[in-house]
Amino acid sequence: MSNDPSVPPPVAERLQHPFLTYDMICQIPEAIQGTIEKSSGRLGSIRQRVKDKSDFFFTGCGTALFSSMLGSAMFSLMDGDGLHSECVQALELGNGGRSAKNSVTFGVSHSGITKTTLDALRRMKSMGSYTIGITHFDRSPIGREVDETLVVGNGPDKSRCHTKCYPASALPLTMMGIELLDERDAVKSERRQKIRRELAGIPQLTKRVLVSTEPIMKELAQNSAMKRTFYFAGTGPSYANALEAALKILETSYVPAQGFETEQLLHGPWVSIDSESVVFVMATEQRTYGRSMDLVRAATSLGANVVALVHEGDREIGSICKNTIELPSIDEQLTPYLSIIPLYFFAYYMCLRRGYNPDYLRYLTPAYWTARNVIFPPGTH
C-alpha cells in the first residue's frame, strides 16, 4: 500500500465552534429516529430468515466495532439458550478462527467501503454465513458483498470524528436482538415489552440528555481538559461506550485515554490513577453497581477527578462523588444510547479547550495526512 499524492488533504470547513462534530452530536436524536423508521419494516422479514441460526457474529473497525459491541449486547441475553453471539474485530474475523456454519454475520461500516470489514464479510459469506451490512450511505460497496443491507441514520456523519453514527449503527442490532428475544422467549415477556416501549422513546430521551448534560460537560471539560490521563470504565453494554469515549479523546485531543471494563481497571491499571487523572465511571448496571462504587471510592481517594454516570434518583454514588451525571432511568441494555451523549460533549469541549479542530482527526497536518494514506489507500475507508 502506497501513498497517492494525487489525493489532496482536507480543507477545514469550519474554524470555530460550532464545528461539524458538534452538529453531529446534536443530531443523535434524529439519527436514532431515522434508524427506527428505516429498520422497523425490515427486521420482521430478517427475523424469519435468521431465527433458526445458532451463531451470530458482529464485526467492524474503530467506532463501527464499538457499535457492533453495543448492538450485540442484546444478543448476549440469549447466550446459553442454544445460541452463541460474539463481536470480533474485522481483521481477526477476516483471517480465520471462526466457523460460519449455521451463522449470521453483521458488519458495520459507516461509509460502506471499509476494506477490512468488507473482507471479513466476504470471507464469512463464502463459508455459508448469512451476511448483513449496516451503513449510512445508499448504494455503497458493502451492498455488493452481503446478502442484505440496512441503510440507517439520517444521513452520513459530516465529521471525520464520527459520533452520531455510533448509536445509529448499533440500534438496528439491538432491535434485531429484541426480535429474536420474542422468537426464542429468552427473556420474560414483561421485560421485553418494557424494552420495546423504552426503545421507541429513545429519540425524545436523547433530546432531554442533550439539553441537560451539555452545560455540565462543558464546564467539566474546561476545568479538567489539561489533565494528563483519561479513563473510562463500564460493564455490559456500557463497556462499548467506555472504548468509544476513549477513542474520541484520542481522535480529537491526542492525549492518553483508555476505556476499560470496570473490573479490568481495578486489576492493575488503577495504580496509574492520580491527581492528574480524570476517571469516568458508568454505574448504570445494577448487577455490577458495587464494583462501580468501589472504583469511585478508590479513584477519589487517589485525588482523581471522578465523574459518575448514574440513573436519575441515584443517591449512593452521588453521596461520594462530586461530579454525578444523572440519566433517565431506562433498561440497562438501552442506557448506553443516552450515556454516550455527555461523554461526546466532554470530548468535544476538551478538544476546544486544548485548541484543536475536532472535525479532521489531525488530517490538516501534512505528515498525518500522508500517514493516513499509507494506512488507508484511497477508496478503502
Image (cartoon, rainbow, N blue to C red):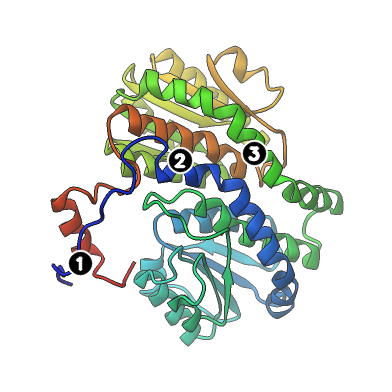
**Quick one: label 1 or label 2, which is nearer the N terminus?**
1
Q: Which mark is residue 22?
A: 2
Vertical comparison of 325 with 341: above or below: above
Mark 3: amino acid? Lys
Instruction: Using residue 214 as the reference point, say whether residue 202 is left or right of it.
Output: right
Query: Are dots 3 and 2 in contact, CB under 8 Å?
Result: no
Mark 1: amino acid? Val
Instruction: Using residue 18 as the reference point, say whether residue 207 is left or right of it.
Output: right
Q: Which residue is drawn at the image coordinates 25% and 56% (left, top)? A: 10
Give the alpha-carbon distance from disc 3 to disc 2, as whole Å: 14 Å
Instruction: Using residue 332 as the reference point, say whether residue 230 is left or right of it.
Output: left
Q: Is residue 243 visible?
A: no
**Horizontal and vertical percent for residue 215?**
52, 24
The quadrant the N terminus occupies is: bottom left
Give the alpha-carbon distance from disc 1 to disc 3, as whole Å: 38 Å
Q: Which residue is drawn at the image coordinates 31% and 23% (left, top)? A: 227
Task: Decide which of 140, 170 is in the foreground and name it.
Answer: 140
Q: Is residue 120 visible?
A: yes
Mark 2: amino acid? Tyr
**Horizontal and vertical percent for residue 159?**
39, 51
**Quick one: label 3 or label 2, which is nearer the N terminus?**
2
Q: Which residue is mark 1?
A: 7
Local packing at callout 1 (Cα closer than 10 Å; few below 14, some 14-19, many 20+) is few
Q: Which residue is drawn at the image coordinates 42% and 37% (left, top)? A: 18
**Quick one: label 1 or label 3, which is nearer the N terminus?**
1
The quadrant the C terminus occupies is: bottom left
Q: Which residue is drawn at the image coordinates 71% and 64% (left, top)? A: 81
Local packing at callout 2 (Cα closer than 10 Å; few below 14, some 14-19, many 20+) is some
Q: Which mark is residue 207?
A: 3
Query: Are dots 1 and 2 in contact, CB under 8 Å?
Result: no
Instruction: Using residue 28 as the reference point, say whether residue 265 is left or right of it.
Output: left
Tell me the SS state at disc 2. helix
